[in-house]
Image: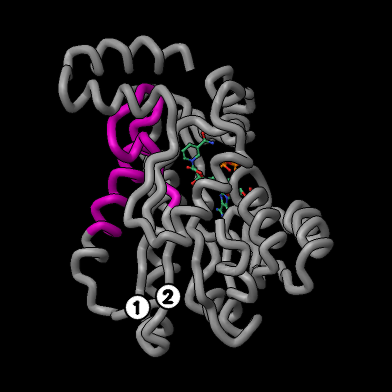
Amino acid sequence: MGMKYFADKVIWITGASSGLGAELALQLAKEKARLILSARNETALQAVQQQCLSYTTHCVVLPADLVKDPLAPLTSEALRAYGHIDILINNAGVTQRSLAVDTTPEVDRRLMEINFFAPVSLTKHLLPHFRERQSGHVIVVSSMAGLMGFPLRTAYSAAKHALHGYFETLQVEHTIPGLHITIVSPGRVNTPISLHALTGTGSLHNQMDKGQQNGIPVEVCAARILTAIERKKRHVIIARNEKLLWWLRKFIPPLYYSIARKAGLKH
Ligand SMILES: NC(=O)c1ccc[n+]([C@@H]2O[C@H](COP(=O)([O-])OP(=O)(O)OC[C@H]3O[C@@H](n4cnc5c(N)ncnc54)[C@H](OP(=O)(O)O)[C@@H]3O)[C@@H](O)[C@H]2O)c1
């Protein structure tokens, strides 16, 4: 990665209190970016901010619940932090661990709100700003579950699929010169995401799943995302076995169905 690409760029990261978002913040701080960190947990955000401030002089926290808080005033506040925004990283997300039959409609909606409507809404609030500057970059952290179904994740997978539809269409419309959109599809990454996963009734799954623990190291995933941003990639897949599964789905569908079922139901 060219060391200078992110220097001084103003980057708003959602879901920066944990996992991938916190790691992206840290790596970007090392590149001397100017950061705005959002998530609900203010204490956790401040801990990440402290780490970042040992590398960059500019890092502010902007705590928010992206499902409950009005996002227009939040976006204005983010814009006031440094006067402009170069890059929005839509990373906040919540996964699911429940069969469709056991999942309440409320949980389906919550998963759509945080994983789909929040990134769409933040992006839309920033589009006029990007149009005015004729420049901007929106990153959307989707998932391999946004490219194929996977057990225990019906609404999560649906929300991530929806992101592909929305942001790919935005890429094709291409009405703002200088605006780039990068969709990221990671396979399993070693983060606490399964601890924060929702069960069918909306309680926390609260278990560190084996699949999660054996996932791609978060440092590796974050570094690959930054490379994709710098190269202005439209879509990047960062996965191991899931990529193989995705190819099977394309070329030998029956194998995808049986393997995904067996692998998925084990967590
Ligand atoms: N880990 C994986 O295997 C994997 C694989 C593919 C894709 N992804 C995607 O990667 C992204 C990051 O996940 P992660 O693995 O880093 O999980 P994580 O450690 O659980 O982090 C999720 C982040 O989202 C934030 N968040 C959740 N609900 C929010 C809300 N209502 N408002 C604001 N922020 C909220 C959380 O902060 P607060 O709780 O403080 O609000 C946290 O910072 C997600 O979009 C996820 O779907 C992860």
Residue 252 vertical position relative to residue 76 in the rendered view, above or below:
above
Q: Which residue is mark 2?
A: 136
Residue placed under numbered mark 1 in the picture: 178
Q: Provide residue 20's location: percent of width, then percent of height.
A: 59, 45
266 with respect to 243 (left or right): right
Measure the alpha-carbon separation of dots 2 and 1. 6 Å
Query: Disc 2, disc 1: CB below 8 Å?
Result: yes
- Residue under the point 35% across and 74% down: 179
Horizontally, is 210 left or right of 54 in the view? left
Q: Quadrant of residue 52?
A: bottom right
- Residue drawn at point x = 29 percent, y = 29 percent: 149
Does the magenta-highlighted stretch encompass residue 218? no
Task: Tell me where the magenta segment starts and ends, as one range.
Answer: 141-168
Residue 78 picture location, percent across and down: 59, 76
Q: Residue at x 44, y 46 (%)?
A: 110
Instruction: Identify which residue, 136 or 227, lies in the foreground.
Output: 227
